[in-house]
Image: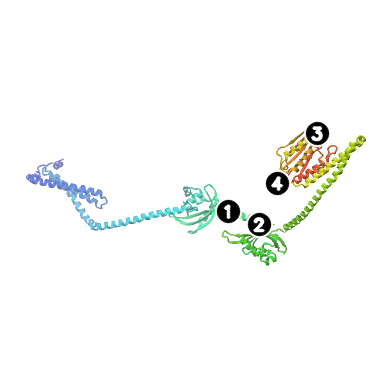
Amino acid sequence: MDFFRQLFLSGDFQPHGFCYRWNSGLVWLNVLSDALIALAYFTIPFTLLWFIRKRRDLPFSWMFALFGVFIIACGTTHVMEVWNLWHAQYWLAGIIKAITALASIPTAILLVQLVPKALALPSPDELKKVNRHVVDRTEELGRANAELARANKALLQYQDQQRLVFDSIPYPVWVYESYTLAIKDVNQSAIRSYGYSREEFLSLTIKDLRPAEDTPALLENAKKAPEGAETAGSCKHRKKNGDLIDVEITSGTVVFEGRDARLVVATDVTERKQTEEALRQSDERLNLLVQGVKDYAILMLDPEGRVTTWNDGAERIKGYRAEEAIGQHFSKFYTPEAVAQDKPSQDLKIAAEQWRFEEEGWRVRKDGTRFWANVVITALRDKTGQLRGFGKVTRDITERRQAAEEVERQRNELARSNAELIATNNELEAFSYSVSHDLRAPLRSIDGFSLALLEDYEEKLDAGGKDNLHRVRAATQRMGVLIDDLLNLSRVTRTEMKLQRVDLSAIGRSVATDLKNSQPERRSEFSVQEDLEAYADSHLMRIALENLLGNAWKFTSKRESACIEFGKTHCNGSLAYFVRDNGAGFDPARAERLFGAFQRLHDTNDFPGTGVGLATVQRIIHRHGGRIWAESAVERGATFYFTLEARQGGA
């Protein structure tokens, strides 16, 4: 406590002011001087402290701190000088000076050691040079950075162009790492073709694109792939949807992202392989077809006319085996006289100029025999129009030629026969009219005189005589009807047909009306179907229906009520017309006699007639290209069917 009391008390000492005798000028001179010195000393450390904080990279920053402590201590001594002008605390002032001494001694010692190091620091000129160098280097680095920026921009543009080119390649392309087989990059064509997104593709390995059964071979080939060499091959790939496609692969080594990799170009050849397979099958079928053709000699010729292919038909027709014919000139199949006239070369020339040559003529077999052939030679040209050869097809038509000659001979004979038949028909027609006239005259006389006897001598004739005269008259009348029927039969055969659309329903109704008017007392029912039409001769069809419906009317005469129907139906897929009645019918065992002239299946006393009507109908139907037949049973009625096959333009 005594120490602190002495430290802060004046004791018996006098202030410095007494030493200055309290001369105000001298006092204030010291006060102001010491105060300004202290202020300066206190300011300097703060400046150094600010400098050290700003330049933490200074190598001697601790020296600045130590120098700051020394200056503060010095400043404090000057403050104590001002204080002691009025106060006598010399112990405190001494202690502060001792502290200042302690701070100054190490500062001085360290400063001595620091001076050589400080001297080693660059001088301002050197710093200017260094700074100039730094500025130059900075400018160079700026220019280098600008060049680098331009290079980076060009590189980015190049990479963009490369990506654009990569994505614009029309074939699927990808890059895979050689060691892991992982796909590292892929173009748009591959994405479109395989159905994966880019992210999905980059998560795959090339094993994922191949069928599972191909994986062992793929791994083996990957190991054996020669370093740096380009490889090519074909395989199958599987799309995302599971479809398998045939591809041709070309790959080469690249460095991708600093690692060994392979660039793969894949070409989808599925359609091409399908086309090739279809073409192969087509060629195979064509070859089988050509080789299987036996009736035609089918061969190929080179542009000079030498045989290049030979089929079995050629061997059968010409007699040469393939090994004998191939390589030979096709002129050996011509007759010697044709070869002498240079006909083979002329035929090829015509085919080359007109694309095709065809003729019929004699050709020669291996054994020397000749045959009549149909020959077609076709020029074969490629897409550029270059002549590549000829196709030659030969057919042996000797039999056809002989048949044609025979047909011509028969045609000539038929023409002569037709001429003779026409002459015979003309004679027959003249004879028919002559017979008709010559027979009708005596028949009229017999009928007339028989009638005269009945009228003039009726009282003198007994019943037997009268009956005989009636029989004579009936016979002459039947004879007249028979002559008319024969004339009609003759006319039906010889009359020229005029084919047209005929309304058979109208004809049927007209005939039915005439029949009912002839015997109005009879009970009958006629049924004629509507819309019965045919392309036929209307006059002949009326004669036919008059006979068919007339027969039905006649053979239903013994029925209490006659039912007669005219209509159409289908028989064996063909249209057929029919006339059906409920009359007496006939025995089907005797049906073949129905359509013969003068053939009758019933007694004349029961059903009168001449037996010519159905024969006339049959001839009419035959002239129309049709046929007629009947179905019946005794007392069960009858149905007559007929077809008409006549068409416009002839019968």
Camera-nearest label, 1 or 2:
2
Q: Are marks 4 and 1 in contact (CB under 8 Å)?
A: no
Mark 1 sits on what residue?
A: 275
- What is the distance, in whole Å, between disc 2 and disc 3 at their CAs? 73 Å
The type of residue carrying mark 1 is Thr
Ranked by sequence position, the earlier of labels 4 and 2 is 2
Q: Give the structural element (helix, strand or loop) at label 1.
A: helix
Which one is in front in this view, the residue at disc 1 or the one at disc 3? 3
The spot of residue 418 in percent (x, y) is 77, 52
Can you see residue 45? yes
Q: Under tag 4, what secondary structure? A: loop
Q: Earlier in the sequence, mark 3 or mark 4?
A: 3
Name the N-terminal-most of marks 2 and 3.
2
Query: x%, y% of residue 389?
Result: 61, 61
Name the residue located 42 percent from the left edge and 54 percent from the top edge.
Answer: 159
Q: Who comes first in sequence, dot 4 or dot 1?
A: 1
Any mark on residue 559, and which? 3
Q: Considering depth in this image, is 380 or 613 the residue closer to the camera?
A: 613
Task: Assign a secondary structure to mark 3.
Answer: loop
Pointer 2 residue: 290
Pick the front one: 89 or 24: 24
Disc 4/disc 1 C-alpha distance (Å): 51 Å
The residue singled out by tag 4 in the image is 648
**Residue density around tag 4, few if under 14, some if 14–19, many if 20 or more, within 10 Å:** few
